[in-house]
Image (cartoon, helix red, strand yellow):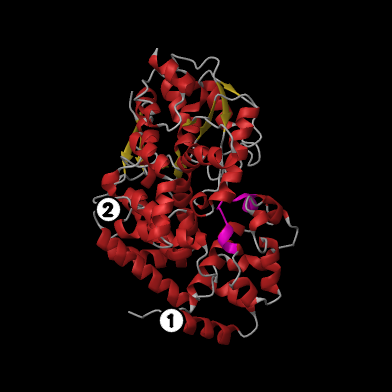
Amino acid sequence: MTTAMTTANANEAAVAKYKNNFLKEVEATVEEGHWVKMCMQCGVCAGSCPFGPHWEHSPQKIFMMIRAGKREEVLKSDAMWMCTSCYNCMVRCPRQLPITHIMHGLANYSYRLGLSPKGQPNQAIAKLFWDSALKYGRVNELKFSLAMYFRDGFVQGVKNALAMQGVGLGLVKAGRLNPMEIISGHTCKDTSGIHKMIAKAREIEDRRRGLA
Amino acid sequence: MTKKQYAFYPGCSSQKGASAANYITSFGVICDKLDIQLNEIPDWNCCAASIGYAEGGELPRIVMGARNLALSDQHLPGQDIVSGCPACWLANREATERLQHSSSLMAEANEALKEVSLNLRTDFNTKSRHFTEVLIEDIGYAGMKAPVIKPLDGVKIAGYVGCQANRPYGIAGESFENPQYLDKMIETCGAEAVPYDQKVTCCGGALAFSEPEKAQALIRNIVESAYDHGADLIVTPCPLCQANVEIYQSEINKKKGTKFNMPVVYYTQLLNVAYGGSIKEAGLDGQLIRAEKLEKIAGK
């Protein structure tokens, strides 16, 4: 079994391999990245995004920046992390680019290279969600919520949890949040198999993307 | 009458004691009345959802889907895979399409599936569908109307379709900008679908958790527009839309001084009550903001 490179090594290797051709790098390593060159810069995606006002760069800008070789600016941006996965940009794109998937792919690639902004809240939730889903094969909503509240330390966690206490108790009363999930929650039977399966999938993908 | 058989993928939020537990409760009466049988896929795992991208990447995410597809194909061959959750539906359908379109991705997925002693046949093309598609396409609006014994007369409803029940796939023949199916379902139940300009607005999705201020600004518009158009309640086909739009109303009230108290229910709860289901059968006891107008009809 090959081991994944350290993130710093993976980044250096990618820089060396693709030289200054960032578009080529994106095409080879980013999910659906081969579509980027098809963008015709109409801006419909930028105007369609529910979190549009909060992005550093719209998808339209990101695609042009990729073509202009702005590697650091793109991969260190928080832009891709602001995607709510609403798919507005994707269904409205006149060239039918899978914009949502490209944004997800860019976020994942920047994260794997260790370039994504540290402490970005949506990156934190994305990681916690995946970890929760993998651990038991199914998401444990209670542990996932608590992990989210406590991600900035215990004191902030207690504050966050207390602030949402009313909602939490309401959900418990309505039968939609089970306090017992903290001890024993829903789980798949074959969790160990799932762990092995995902480790294998990651190994294959890392190898394909030059991250291993 | 023989029942229509489907492989059922409940998804994490629809499990007992989870945030959409009452949604699944409300399926019971509907399946009975419409002769639908949902057969749960054994040992299904999380669909990986959209938010799984950051840590998961492409192949691990697709493989999570592929395991569910392979289990369904093995245990419930030939049955369409049905989910009530748009995010699950999207993930299952996307996994199927991506695997169909790329033989190399299929080969990679099968290499990973060996670890769980499963294999997805390379010609796998079973449909993944949302429960609304089963109702609309297999039962039809007339069929849905037939068992109505308590029309929801005088109830005004804002049909909130949201994102993933509508994009990128949506319901066949519907527009992304102004889908009609939810309004038609509301009217099938005898209620009135009010005009609603926030029909396909995003609720913030998973980011409601991590970007509360930004998401609550969207949720505020969704609720406010329902009030502006005289709605008694909002109806949705999505567990995450339901949870976000219902749960955060009290937070918005605290921060913005609004007095939101707008019930948010599922389309299945409307049908359930119209078919004569009780408050409990319709899962109306699972609301944080009780849907009094529906409870009154269900209690009759």
Q: At which x and y percent is residue A21?
A: 65, 80
Residue sitting farthest toward the bottom: A16
Say which of B131 and B103 sits in front. Answer: B131
Crowding at mark 1 (Cα within 10 Å: few <14, some 14-19, many 20+): few
| Label 2: chain letter | A
Residues in magenta, as a range: A80-91
Q: Which residue is mark 1?
A: A6
B28, B261: nearer the viewer: B261
Q: Quadrant of residue A97?
A: bottom right
The C terminus of chain B lies in quadrant: top left
The reply, left or right, for residue A143 in relation to residue B228 is left
- What is the secondary structure assignment of the residue under circle 2? loop
Instruction: Residue at 46% x, 58% y: name it.
Output: A125
In this rendering, the label closer to the viewer, 1 or 2:
1
Name the chain letter of the residue that bears numbered label 1: A
Can the viewer see residue A94?
Answer: no
